[in-house]
Image: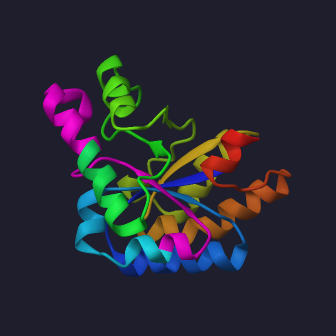
């Protein structure tokens, strides 16, 4: 199973999350917003340096299902280029912003930008709404299964507080947290 994070927001919370992930030996995949990477050039190194994975989550995080084709292409390419600048690689994965099921247009533009795989998720605790940490843990636990891809957000304190109990719950069920690349390769 994989814990994935939409990367944006408070850097202190990101560093707290990375410290917890390192301490727990629970690698994560961060789908970074490109403008966030540009505003915080050390973020990519901190994520990758901890053995985690970095991927594309558009440049400004618009609702991709509601923008013109040229904007879809631009959002994917600009984030890809930000990843190259800050991480030395465009990342292997793309996750569209603001839409659960990517349209044929989004899939086509992701492919043109070099992303053969668009990664969704099947467990969403709605942590971006800032429920209590226990609610996040309970929502994840209710849907956790082998092969699960959990969608979380780096910039929320309750999500960071919920991380260790979520990892414990996964391991209690004999599930191993891995990066998306490891999950898809296995």
Task: Looking at the picture, tell me which residue is in the foreground, 170 or 133.
Answer: 170
Q: Is residue 108 left or right of residue 142?
A: left
The quarter in which the C terminus is drawn is top right
Q: Is residue 51 magenta?
A: yes
Q: Is residue 145 left or right of residue 118?
A: right
In percent of the image, x 69 and y 44: which residue is there?
A: 183
Q: Is residue 68 magenta?
A: yes
Judging from the image, the colouring scheme is: rainbow
In percent of the image, x 39 and y 74: which residue is there?
A: 43
Q: Is residue 158 left or right of residue 155?
A: right
Residue 16 rendering spot, x and y as whole percentages: 50, 80
Above or below residue 117? Residue 8 is below
In percent of the image, x 32 and y 41: which residue is there?
A: 97
Task: Looking at the picture, tell me which residue is in the foreground, 27 or 185.
Answer: 185
Residue 181 rendering spot, x and y as whole percentages: 63, 48
> Quadrant of residue 81 in the image?
bottom left
Q: Is residue 161 left or right of residue 41?
A: right
Residue 109 rendering spot, x and y as whole percentages: 31, 29
**Where does the magenta region start and end?**
47-76
Above or below residue 143? Residue 176 is below
Q: Is residue 28 visible?
A: yes
Marks counted in the figure total 0
Above or below residue 147? Residue 88 is below
In percent of the image, x 83 and y 57: which residue is there?
A: 172
């Amino acid at each position: 199973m994989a814990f994935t994070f939409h990367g944006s927001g408070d850097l202190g919370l990101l560093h707290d999350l990375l410290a917890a992930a390192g301490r727990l030996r629970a690698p994560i995949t961060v789908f970074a917003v490109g403008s966030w990477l540009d505003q915080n050039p050390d973020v990519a190194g901190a994520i990758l340096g901890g053995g985690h994975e970095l991927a594309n989550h558009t440049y400004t995080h618009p609702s991709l299902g509601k923008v013109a084709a040229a904007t879809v292409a631009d959002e994917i390419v600009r984030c890809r280029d930000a990843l190259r600048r800050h991480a030395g690689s465009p990342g292997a994965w793309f996750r569209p912003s603001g839409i659960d099921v990517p349209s044929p247009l989004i899939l086509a533009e992701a492919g043109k930008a070099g992303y053969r795989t668009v990664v969704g998720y099947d467990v969403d605790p709605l942590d971006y709404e800032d429920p209590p940490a226990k609610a996040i843990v309970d929502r994840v636990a209710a849907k956790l299964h082998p092969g699960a891809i959990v969608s979380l957000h780096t910039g929320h304190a309750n999500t960071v507080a919920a991380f260790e109990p979520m990892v414990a719950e996964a391991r209690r069920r004999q599930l191993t947290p891995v990066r998306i690349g490891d999950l898809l390769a296995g």
